[in-house]
Image (cartoon, grey):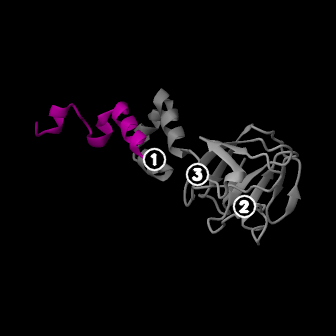
């Protein structure tokens, strides 16, 4: 077998067919690689209709969180869930995922939080001490915070209200888009 016709491939890479294209997509880890690959030819856009396509794309941009818990008294994690301890203390937990490019989605559930739960994103330079809030120690402008009890956002501004609230043990997804200027986060 030394000719493409013996492999039943016509038209080079485009002749491989949708199953091979989907297999190649499933091996890619970065959304940018998928975008470049799909831009090869208009024929590849037919893949969007294939049932496997959505599952592959979802697996590429969905990140499983790894919680950084500095002190045992702060709480415990289980998969994409963090359970706050019974302490009535600030508990800022970071996720060990640095997003540098592309569009990435992270879904987390925070439990045993009571009334004051906050989720958000932080600059990669931030490190959070146990017992401190995400705005403490000069991090007010390096974090974007989404408060659950009344849907308030904090960043450079102090409290933009009117968004949907969320409750204890409700899954919240955070989508970070590093492809836009300015960068964008959606909860």
**Residue shown at 72% from the left, 52% from the top:** 74
Give the residue at mark 3: 103
Instruction: State the residue lying farthest toward the top.
Output: 51
> How far apart are labels 2 and 3 at the CA level?
30 Å
| Residue 89 x %, y % | 81, 55
Instruction: Report the span colored magenta.
Output: 1-28
Residue 75 left/right relative to 27: right
Determine contact: label 3, label 1, CB under 8 Å. no
Give the residue at mark 1: 34
Question: Circle 2 — which element?
Answer: loop
Of callouts 1 and 2, the N-terminal one: 1
Q: Residues within 10 Å of mark 3 (few under 14, many from 20)?
A: many
Question: Is residue 11 located in the magenta-colored stretch of the structure?
Answer: yes
Of callouts 2 and 3, the N-terminal one: 3
The quadrant of the rendering that contains the N terminus is: top left
Residue 116 left/right relative to 9: right
| Residue 139 x %, y % | 75, 68
Residue 104 left/right relative to 108: left
Question: Of the numbered discs in the image, which one, if any, rests on residue 130?
Answer: 2
Front residue of this view, candidates 97 and 21: 97
| Residue 2 x %, y % | 10, 40
């Amino acid at each position: 077998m030394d000719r493409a016709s013996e492999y039943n491939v016509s038209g080079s890479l485009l002749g491989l067919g949708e199953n091979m294209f989907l297999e190649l997509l499933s091996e890619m880890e970065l959304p940018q690689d998928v975008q470049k690959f799909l831009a090869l030819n208009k024929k590849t856009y037919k893949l969007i209709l294939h049932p496997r396509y959505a599952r592959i794309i979802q697996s590429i941009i969905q990140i499983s969180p790894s919680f950084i818990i500095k002190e045992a008294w702060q709480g415990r994690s289980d998969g994409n869930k963090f359970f706050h301890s019974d302490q009535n203390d600030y508990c800022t937990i970071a996720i060990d995922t640095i997003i540098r490019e592309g569009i990435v989605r992270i879904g987390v559930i925070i439990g045993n939080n009571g009334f004051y739960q906050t989720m958000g994103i932080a600059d990669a330079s931030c490190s959070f001490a146990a017992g401190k809030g995400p705005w403490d120690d000069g991090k007010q402008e390096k974090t974007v915070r989404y408060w659950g009890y009344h849907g308030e956002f904090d960043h450079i501004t102090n409290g933009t209200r009117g968004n949907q609230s969320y409750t204890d043990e409700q899954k919240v997804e955070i989508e970070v888009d590093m492809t836009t200027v300015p960068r964008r986060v959606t909860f």
